[in-house]
Image (cartoon, rainbow, N blue to C red):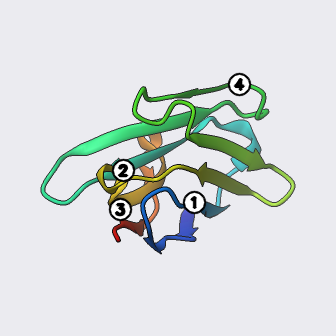
Amino acid sequence: QVQLVESGGGLVQPGGSLRLSCAASGFTFSSYGMNWVRQAPGKGLEWVSWINPGGDRTTCADSAKGRFTISRDNAKNTLYLQMNSLNPEDTAAYYCAKPDLGYWGQGTQVTVSS
């Protein structure tokens, strides 16, 4: 069955960095564009970034531009999100997802606090 397993979240101080990973299995990962989506406490889902199947095209939300970088390693069936210059507004559960197919991970919590 399809599995998306995120890791790499944690507590980080403002200005710090984290790298999230998402291990995919149960489907042909290299054939699909993939997304990172986040949900802050008490708020709805917010799309963060997208990458095409080949990994050479990306887009991201204005809130992430210049700070977050999405990437993928199709040989390892893994999606990444490098997050730099984190601020408290980035505190959220982060999910890798292919929403149109209903593929969601369980999420990894990122907390930005001093």
Q: Amino acid at mark 2?
A: Arg
CA distance for labels 3 and 1: 16 Å
Residue annotated with mark 3: 93
Q: Contact (CB < 8 A) between labels 4 and 2?
A: no
To which residue does mark 2 refer?
38
Amino acid type assigned to the residue bearing label 3 in the image = Ala
Q: What distance separates the C-alpha of mark 3 from that of mark 4?
A: 24 Å
Instruction: Please identify the quarter of the rendering in which residue 114 is found.
Output: bottom left
Residue 104 vs residue 95, the one in the foreground: 95
Determine which of the numbered discs, if any, sits on residue 17 in the image: 1
| SS at circle 1 | loop
Q: Is residue 16 visible?
A: yes
Question: Please, what secondary structure does the residue beneath circle 3 have?
Answer: strand
Q: Amino acid at mark 4?
A: Arg
The residue that label 4 is drawn on is: 57
Instruction: Give me the residue at 74% from left, 47% from top.
Output: 72
Name the amino acid type tagged 1.
Ser
Instruction: Tell me which numbered mark, 3 or 4, is placed earlier along the sequence.
Output: 4
- Image quarter hosting the N terminus: bottom right
Q: Earlier in the sequence, mark 4 or mark 2?
A: 2
Residue lying at 40% horizontally and 33% vertically, measured from the top left: 63
For this rendering, which residue is in front, 79 or 81?
81
Mark 4 to mark 2: distance in Å? 20 Å
Q: Is residue 1 visible?
A: no
Residue 89 appears left or right of 102: left
Q: Tag 1 or tag 2, which sits nearer the N-term?
A: 1
For label 3, the crowd category at 10 Å Cα-Cα, with few meaning under 14, some 14 to 19 and many 20 or more, is: some
Pair 2/1: label in front: 1
Q: In the rendered structure, which disc, 3 or 1, sits on the residue that comes first in sequence? A: 1
